[in-house]
Image: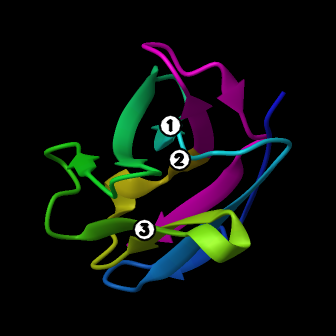
Amino acid sequence: QVQLVESGGGLVQAGDSLRLSCAASGRSFSLYTMGWFRQAPGKERDFVASISWSTGTTRYADSVKGRFTISRDNAKNTVYLQMNSLKPEDTAVYYCAARRSFNYDSWGQGTQVTISS
């Protein structure tokens, strides 16, 4: 079982930056892919970014490419999401998730990110 705890959300203005953290615990993560997802009110949960824990290979949703950066710190078992040039449409609850196979099956509790215009 993997435990994931997000932090770093908050209320900022458009154009500002935030860094989200996801602390992972429970087992070795070398075979895992870690992801960030977000869910805005009344909308489905959407993929934001992912990173392979072993290779560092990253993927991004088109809506965040060039603005968001996902990274990991192996020593701290922590994944980060650096969010720059934030827009009001980035407002959502952001979730950290982990998978070893095709589906993400471990999720954090979420952290609220609110961008004011």
Is mark 1 in CB contact (under 8 Å) with mark 2? yes
Label 1 vs 2, first from the N-terminus: 1
The amino acid at mark 2 is Ala
Q: Quadrant of residue 68?
A: bottom left
Residue on which disc 3 sits: 71
Query: What numbered label is drawn on residue 92?
Result: 2
Residue under the image location 22 percent in, 70 percent down: 67
Task: Tell me the distance, in whole angstroms, between the alpha carbons under discs 1 and 2.
Answer: 4 Å
Residue under the image location 42 percent in, 83 percent down: 17
Element type at mark 2: strand
Residue under the image location 43 percent in, 51 percent down: 54
Q: Quadrant of residue 28?
A: top right
What residue span does the magenta drawing correspond to? Answer: 95-117
Element type at mark 3: strand
Figure check: 86 above or below 4: below
Residue density around tag 1, few if under 14, some if 14–19, many if 20 or more, within 10 Å? some
Residue on which disc 1 sits: 40
Label 1 vs 3, first from the N-terminus: 1
The amino acid at mark 3 is Ser
Percent position of residue 58, x then y: 27, 52
Figure check: 101 above or below 39: above
The amino acid at mark 1 is Ala
Task: Tell me the distance, in whole angstroms, between the alpha carbons under discs 1 and 3.
Answer: 23 Å
